[in-house]
Image (cartoon, rainbow, N blue to C red):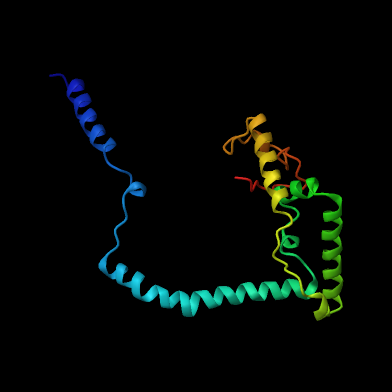
Amino acid sequence: MSFYRALSKNLITTMAARRSVVPWYQQEQKLSAFEEWTKKTLYPYWFYYVKGPYERYCYERLVADLRMYGLMFDDKHDFTDPLIERALEIMPHDLHVGRYRRQMRAIEMNAKKNHLPLTEQNYDPMIPYLAPFIEEAKFQMQEEQELLQFHPWDRRLYSGPTTGFGETSHYSTFTSW
């Protein structure tokens, strides 16, 4: 038997054995006895007394901070992000004006070190008015990238300071995938 024939047989048998191995991320994860005990006995107490109250405190503090200045949660999005920039472009004019006025009022109240009266803080700042426009912007950007045959590993579109997808900030990155 020649050397190359023996080598090819050896490679075929080792590659067949390697193909039959299930990757680590598809294997069923088994917990040790200690991990099972921890999951069943300690974690509920951890969540009930530590993690849950802390997350609730953070949420309530965020809501209180937004209400103090009359902001909505979607007003805090970074407008230089290309995705948010596109969403603001397709947003109706009345929502855009409301967003601008809320932000200007918050800036002015912050500069003057005062807050909204308590009678005007009775609203839910977590209503996502910008969410449908962000989703539409994602679809638009994805469609443009498919039409231009853009791939993340294709660096030809990054030859200048902007990518050509309409953003105005230099060296920004995409957030749509």
Identify the residue shown where x is 20% and y is 31%: 13
Query: In the image, is residue 133 above or below residue 35?
Result: above
Identify the residue shown where x is 26% and y is 37%: 20
Determine whether, in the image, residue 101 is placed left or right of residue 132: right
The picture places residue 37, in percent across and down from the top left corner, at 30, 72
Identify the residue shown where x is 71% and y is 76%: 64
Q: 107 or 7: which is nearer to us?
A: 107
The picture places residue 69, in percent across and down from the top left corner, at 79, 73
Quarter where residue 8 is shown: top left
Determine whether, in the image, residue 105 is placed left or right of residue 52: right
Is there any visible trace of residue 4 in the rendered image? yes
Quadrant housing the N terminus: top left
Residue lying at the far left in this picture: please name it.
1
Q: 21 or 123: which is nearer to us?
A: 123
Identify the residue shown where x is 82% and y is 64%: 103
Determine whether, in the image, residue 131 is placed left or right of residue 168: left
